[in-house]
Image (cartoon, rainbow, N blue to C red):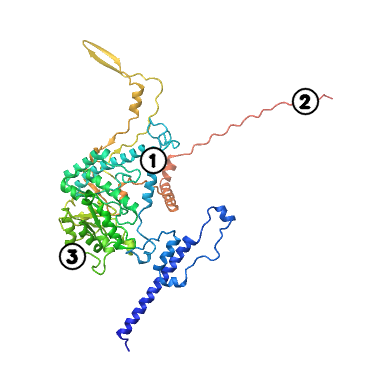
């Protein structure tokens, strides 16, 4: 007899209730363990106190009743908040692995940021001899003197200027090989948005950035930026909001100082993520709206939102972008990991229906649309593993010809060149494979000559030369160079073979050899010297080969060589001494 629909519904409801109870029990047990580890066990302050004076414990330590266990996690938050000193535990994440939602939350600082802050708090100390250049042993920073903040700031500013000058070479390289879209690094000017040691760019970098913008305008290249994942305008922490605004102001100043033409300046956008949800998606959106209203008009004109692979889907951000007039970047890789399953499927077929709405967010501000594309590593299975970008991409998404596509891959320009070659895109035949371990676009010094033998201290006679002056002929001795000039001549570096001009260094050489296959980055470096170790088999083979050669030449050696007789040793004469008899006769 088959069960009725009502009975099946009751069974399904009971099974669902059992799953909920099992999940609540699992979460409660984990939360209890965390509370015991963090709150109930108090470690001694010093090792000797813990060894000889054990910390007293309460007779009846606080515990959680079985009734509280059954109520689940929601009613345990006040207890845990009290144990944590009023600070609630981090809220769970949406998306990703379900088993990790109660263990991880979106971080707002990383070890890299902490390292940078620590480095900024300890600027370089004055040198032992400020009049001389720095030396690792002879002229080191004197840590007994107070730190020189001005010297440290000058150092990081010079780093930023060097980074900015390198962009010009990058733009020339991209133009040569058909790449006209580049993302500027957020770390170009170190510590520029730091809360204590930050600085403005206009006072020292305006001319350099203007030169970069002039080259970009001349070549017609688009430049954009992508502030870090910790630039979040929806965070509940005020210090995070202040840091995010400082970071956006730094990026906006850098792009403004490029002095690009009107349309290129409008297309120079700053792309950020929404960040975490902090347990309440609606409250996070409200905080973003309030903080976005406080931004300057220049930042609002450049700000763009992007969907991510942890919390915020396309369907979450698109209504907000339409409400606040913010362009939205569609990231296909993030969409394939995190999407609204009730409205859309994984892949690109259904997302194409949203193209007109996404395109409209760009057209309102007259900005050229852009999209992001990347692929997960081939071995990735879980959502966490799929977040990692593969070194290169093997295909292209549906992309209109009047928009820009940013390829996010570990191999950077090599991934773009690989796509150009696979799909026969314009410029695919303008570059060739590199020669392994050889570079035709770098200067190589000539091999070192063996050192010359030292000449005698005695002065050798100089060559004599005859010169005709009038009717007479005179001979004279050539003048020798002074000792210091002779030393300079001997200390000159070896001449360069096939010297490459500075403007052509790193540009691929005469045959444009700039491409290497996947995993062959070692071709860029000189080949390491290989030392083959002799094995017993190799030694035995060499011995046999030597024996065969010896047997074949045995007759020749015996015929041509005769052993010389050894000279007979001379016998030494023994000295015979007469005995001196001192005895008396008779």
Quarter of the N terminus within the rendering? bottom left
Q: Quadrant of residue 304?
A: bottom left
Residue 317, compared with residue 414, is above or below; it is: below
* Dot 2 alpha-carbon crowd within 10 angstroms: few under 14, some 14 to 19, many 20 or more: few
Tell me, yes or no, whether the two marked residues, 1 and 2, touch with CB atoms within 8 Å: no
| First in residue order: circle 2 vs circle 3 | 3
- Alpha carbon distance from label 2 to label 3: 139 Å
Classify the position of the C terminus by image quarter. top right
The residue tagged 1 is 123
Residue nearest the observer in this picture, 220 or 316: 316
Q: Earlier in the sequence, mark 1 or mark 3?
A: 1
Can see residue 519? Answer: no
Name the residue carrying label 3: 353
Q: Nearer the viewer, residue 191 or 445?
A: 191
Q: In the structure shown, which secondary structural element does the residue marked by tag 1 occupy? A: loop
Callout in the foreground (1, 2): 1
Q: Nearer the viewer, mark 2 or mark 3?
A: 3
Tell me where residue 408 sits by quadrant: bottom left
Quarter of the rendering containing residue 362: bottom left
In the rendered image, residue 342, in percent from the top left (x then y), is placed at 25, 70
The residue beneath circle 2 is: 581
Q: Secondary structure at mark 3?
A: helix
Q: Are marks 1 and 3 in contact (CB under 8 Å)?
A: no
Q: CA distance from mark 1 to mark 3?
A: 54 Å
Q: Residue at x 46, y 65 (%)?
A: 33
Q: From the top left corner, tell me how far across and down residue 527 is, in percent.
A: 33, 46
């Amino acid at each position: 007899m088959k069960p009725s629909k009502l009975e099946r519904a009751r069974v399904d409801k009971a099974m669902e209730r059992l799953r909920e109870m099992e999940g609540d029990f699992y979460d409660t047990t984990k939360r209890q363990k965390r509370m015991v580890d963090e709150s109930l066990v108090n470690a001694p302050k010093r090792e000797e106190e813990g060894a000889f004076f054990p910390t007293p414990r309460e007779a009846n330590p606080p515990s959680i009743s079985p009734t509280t266990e059954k109520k689940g996690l929601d009613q345990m938050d006040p207890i845990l908040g009290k144990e944590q000193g009023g600070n609630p535990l981090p809220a769970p994440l949406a998306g990703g692995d379900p088993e990790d939602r109660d263990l991880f939350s979106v971080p707002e600082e990383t070890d890299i940021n902490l390292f940078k802050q620590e480095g900024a708090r300890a600027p370089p100390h004055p040198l032992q001899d400020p009049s001389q250049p720095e030396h690792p042993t002879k002229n080191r920073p004197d840590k007994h003197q107070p730190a020189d903040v001005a010297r440290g700031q000058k150092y990081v500013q010079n780093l930023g200027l060097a980074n900015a000058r390198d962009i010009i070479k990058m733009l020339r390289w991209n133009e040569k090989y058909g790449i006209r879209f580049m993302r500027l690094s957020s770390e170009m000017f170190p510590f520029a948005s730091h809360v204590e040691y930050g600085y403005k760019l206009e006072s020292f970098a305006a001319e350099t950035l203007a030169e970069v913008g002039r080259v970009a305008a001349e070549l017609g290249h688009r430049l954009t930026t992508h502030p870090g994942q910790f630039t979040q305008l929806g965070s509940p922490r005020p210090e995070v909001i202040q840091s995010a605004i400082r970071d956006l102001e730094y990026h906006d100043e850098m792009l403004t100082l490029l002095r690009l033409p009107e349309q290129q300046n409008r297309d120079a956008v700053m792309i950020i993520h929404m960040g975490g949800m902090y347990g309440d998606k609606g409250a996070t959106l409200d905080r973003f709206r309030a903080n976005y209203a406080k931004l300057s008009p220049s930042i609002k004109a450049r700000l763009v939102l992007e969907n991510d692979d942890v919390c915020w889907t396309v369907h979450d951000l698109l209504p907000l972008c339409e409400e606040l007039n913010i362009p939205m970047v569609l990231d296909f890789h993030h969409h394939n990991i995190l999407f609204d399953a009730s409205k859309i499927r994984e892949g690109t077929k259904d997302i194409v229906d949203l193209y007109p709405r996404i395109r409209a967010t760009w057209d309102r501000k007259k900005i050229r649309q852009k999209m992001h594309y990347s692929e997960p590593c081939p071995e990735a299975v879980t959502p966490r593993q799929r977040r990692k970008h593969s070194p290169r991409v093997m295909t292209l998404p549906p992309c209109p010809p009047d928009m820009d596509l940013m390829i996010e891959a570990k191999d950077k320009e090599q991934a773009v060149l690989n796509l150009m070659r696979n799909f026969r895109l314009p410029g695919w035949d303008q570059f060739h494979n590199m020669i392994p371990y050889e570079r035709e676009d770098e200067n190589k010094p000539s091999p070192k000559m063996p050192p010359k033998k030292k000449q005698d201290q005695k002065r050798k006679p100089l060559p004599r030369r005859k010169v005709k002056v009038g009717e007479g002929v005179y001979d004279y001795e050539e003048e020798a160079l002074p000792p210091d000039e002779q030393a300079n001549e001997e200390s000159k570096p070896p001449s360069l073979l096939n010297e490459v001009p500075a403007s052509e260094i790193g540009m691929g050489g005469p045959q444009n050899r700039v491409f290497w296959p996947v995993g062959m980055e070692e071709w860029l470096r000189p080949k390491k010297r290989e030392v083959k170790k002799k094995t017993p088999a190799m030694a035995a083979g060499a011995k046999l080969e030597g024996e065969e050669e010896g047997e074949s030449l045995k007759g020749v050696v015996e015929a041509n060589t005769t052993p010389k007789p050894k000279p007979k040793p001379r016998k030494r004469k023994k000295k015979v001494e007469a005995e001196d008899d001192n005895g008396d006769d008779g």
